[in-house]
Image (tube, rainbow, N blue to C red):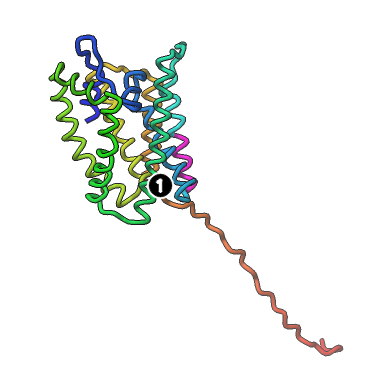
Amino acid sequence: MALYQEKIFKNDYEGEKFVYPTTFVALQCLVYFVTAKACKPIPVMLFAVLIVKKSYTIQKYFFVLMIVFGVGLFIYKDGVNSSQETLWGYMLILISLLFDGCLGAAQDKMRIVSRPSSLNFMYYVNAWSTLIFIPLLFINYEGWRFVQFCIKHYEVGYYMAITVLMGTAGQYFISTMISTYGSLPLAIVTTLRKFLTILFSSLIFGNVLNTRQWVASILIFTALILDALFGKKKLIINKTEPVIKEESTIKENVPKGVA
């Protein structure tokens, strides 16, 4: 699905570009958008601690820090001044991650309070999103521009249809993950799939990764795999209880003068 999204947003439609608010606009401002989004577990964890009052093991915090370091190493560019467009892309990424954290906390709250099934969760989230989002699209004329763009460049409909079908199937598994395991495991799983997105993007679209970026990618996804294996296990410290040798407190009363 991510590959078809990239086709939609990076294709040149007679000098025009397909645009969309916040997250997808950042795709055009940042070359390696999906790896920047690998930071998603961080705000999800932060908001879960602050709002839902969850607690995590020391290992999980360590693995998250590994991810942060890897992402920073990946997006750093030597000798390149940050342009206004790139800074705008970073700002949009931060906004998107902030909403990811809020969404994760809300999902955990719903899971704890009402325990919805995956299909119920999927239905109501999409129903309310549609009711809220469609009027806003036409109030700011974004919906009309979208319709006009699709009529003018009908070839985009093919990629969108495939994206919608794949997204629908993906939404079911996402809803199942949320209702069963919670928002943080979902964030980790969806971040893992970004490795395949980066790999296929490099092969298909020519986004060549240098050695430093490959090392950073390996660091990120190694941390994610270690988190999946050991993140929930609490550190067990073998506290050996001191062995108290019981000394005999019985004193034999030996009469004086007895050898």
Q: Is residue 176 left or right of residue 215?
A: left
Q: Secondary structure at mark 1?
A: helix
Q: Nearer the viewer, residue 91 or 190?
A: 91
User: Where residue 28 appears, x then y in whole percent?
Assistant: 32, 19
User: Where residue 185 appears, x then y in whole percent?
Assistant: 35, 45
Please state which amino acid type lies under the numbered disc 1.
Phe
Q: What residue is shown at x 86% (from left), y 88% (from top)? A: 256
Q: Nearer the viewer, residue 43 or 73?
A: 43
Where residue 213 sits, quadrant-wise, is: top left
Q: Residues within 10 Å of mark 1 (few under 14, many from 20)?
A: some
User: Where residue 168 appears, x then y in whole percent?
Assistant: 19, 39
Q: What residue is shown at x 18% (from left), y 35% (from top)? A: 166
Q: How many marks?
A: 1
- The quarter in which the C terminus is drawn is bottom right
The region drawn magenta spans 57-66
Query: Which residue is identified by label 1?
Result: 230
Residue at the right extreme of this rendering: 257
Residue at the front extreme of this rendering: 139
Question: What secondary structure do most residues of the magenta stretch adopt?
Answer: helix
Q: Nearer the viewer, residue 229 or 175?
A: 175
